[in-house]
Image (spheres, rainbow, N blue to C red):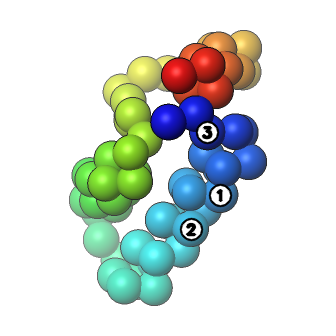
Amino acid sequence: MRMKTNEISGAIVDTVIHIHCELGPGLLESVYHRILVYELEKRGLLVNFGAALAKDGIHRIVNRFQES
């Protein structure tokens, strides 16, 4: 499925807000990361939190999703 940049960022923001409302503050960052990855993958997004990206790297990844 081809997603536009706004759709990808919207899915991320919606998911983060949902997680915050459900769990609230106070958990370890690693817990939030794992939950976020799980929830985004349920939405069909490919997630790689282990990669450190420069701004141009992020654009390449977003463009790759748009081409799929």
Q: Quadrant of residue 23?
A: bottom left
Q: Point out the tag, 2 or 3, that comes first from the N-terminus.
A: 3
Which residue position is annotated with label 2? 14
At 33% from the left and 47% from the top, the residue drawn is 41
Q: Say what secondary structure mark 1 lies in.
A: helix
- Is 56 or 28 nearer to us in this picture? 56
Give the alpha-carbon distance from disc 2 to disc 3, as whole Å: 15 Å
Residue 33 appears in the picture as rendered: no
Which residue position is annotated with label 3? 3
Q: Are marks 2 and 1 in contact (CB under 8 Å)?
A: yes
- Viewer-nearest of discs 2 and 3: 3
Residue lying furthest front: 1
Disc number placed over residue 10 in the picture, else none: 1
Q: Say what secondary structure mark 3 lies in.
A: loop
What's the amino acid at mark 1? Gly
Decide if residue 54 is on the left or right side of residue 34. right
At 56% from the left and 57% from the top, the residue drawn is 11
